[in-house]
Image (cartoon, helix red, strand yellow):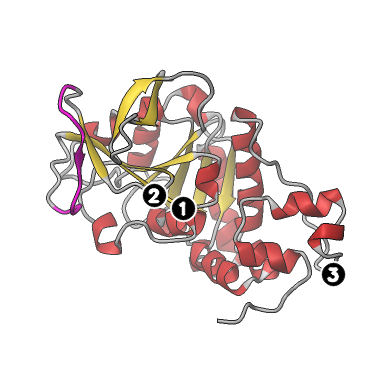
Amino acid sequence: MSDLSHTPTPGGDDTFEFVPSSGPRKPRLAIMGEFSAGKSTLSNLLLGSKPLPEKVTATRLSPVWLSHGQAAPVAHFVDQDRAPEKVTGFEGLDVNAVRYVSMSIQSTILEHCDLIDFPGISDPNMDSEVWERMLPEVDIVLWCTHATQAWRQSEDAAWALVPEDVQARSMLLVTRFDKLTTDRDRRRVMARLDAETEGLFAGVYPLSLLDALTAAEDGDPEGWEASGARRFSEDLHVALAALDPSVPTPSAAPDPAPVPEPEQAAPSARRVSRRIVPRRIRVALGGRRERPSA
């Protein structure tokens, strides 16, 4: 693991640089996978927003390092003697020269970890060095694989480049699981993935990300559960807390029946409210199912 830390410069001019780490740092969570595997949707679900335009995330782009705050995008170069430069537009960035782009936004999950959004690993027009050089900075990978063509040989070859200690903490997300329309197909895909990826991930998670986004927006805990997002989000908490004890760990989800208001609630109910789950899901799990007025 690299001992370099993503830290604001003392000048406070919204630029960033690599400086020696001094004490504990936030865990670093990476989103990886091939194109059209659901990486952008996963990022939107985790962050509760769309920090990058969709048309940008589909183009050639260096890794994007997201942290908590309000700083404009800054390009950091492979040549570390070259000073970071503010980014006015993502289009046209030289991916061979730019090691990563840093930016910070207000997001609950970024209070507990940094998120590094990798480009698709299957772009034939992009040298794999563009993303390989960032692997030493990663603690946990969320690898997205499309359910209908899950875990292709190209994915297996790319995964072999990830350090084994990182693999052991990482999660394989089988996205667009709703595209498998029969129980037989779902069982067959999961059985194959369990066999082909045995020992390569901490866990395998079937997910319907669009259903999870809808459930998050509607404050629908049943939809959140059915999409696969509840199990994934709770296990992600556990993985982050193993790296940083300050990350709140999930307690068992409460019965959706009404509970006392927060100031009178039992400690276990208050712990649930601190989990990194969409606000409307937290409210619904607390028993207050009405949607907030516009």
Crowding around mark 1 (Cα neighbors within 10 Å: few <14, some 14 to 19, many 20+) is some
Residue 131, quarter of picture: top left
The residue lying toward the viewer, choosing from 175 and 72, is 72
Q: Please tell me the numbered disc located at residue 70.
A: 2
The residue labelled by disc 3 is: 257
**Magenta residues, start to end:** 81-91
Of pointers 2 and 3, the one earlier in the residue sequence: 2
- Where's residue 165, x and y in %? 51, 23
Residue neighbourhood size for the residue with mark 2, other residues' Cα within 10 Å, grouped as few (<14), some (14–19), many (≥20):
few
> For this view, does 143 lie left or right of residue 245?
left
CB contact under 8 Å: marks 1 and 2 = yes
C-alpha span from label 1 to label 2 = 7 Å
Whether 123 is drawn above or below 157: the answer is below
For marks 3 and 1 on the same chain, the one whose residue lies earlier in the sequence: 1
Q: Looking at the picture, which amino acid does disc 2 mark? A: Gln
The residue at the point 18 percent across, 45 percent down is 124
The quadrant of the rendering that contains the C terminus is bottom right
Taking the spot 47% from the left edge, 18% from the top edge, the residue there is 22
Is 196 placed left or right of 61 in the picture?
A: right
Question: Does 257 sit above or below residue 237?
Answer: below
Residue type at mark 3: give it: Ala
Mark 3 closeness class: few <14, some 14–19, many ≥20 residues within 10 Å: few
Residue 270 percent across, percent down from the top left: 78, 52
x, y percent for residue 249: 70, 41
Is 257 part of what is drawn in magenta?
A: no
Residue 229: percent from left, percent from top: 60, 57
Residue at 29%, 61% (x, y): give it: 53
Image point 75% across, 72% down: which residue? 288
Q: Secondary structure at mark 2?
A: loop
Kind of residue at badge 1: Gln
Q: Nearer the viewer, residue 235 or 67?
A: 67
Left or right, 270 with respect to 123, comes to: right
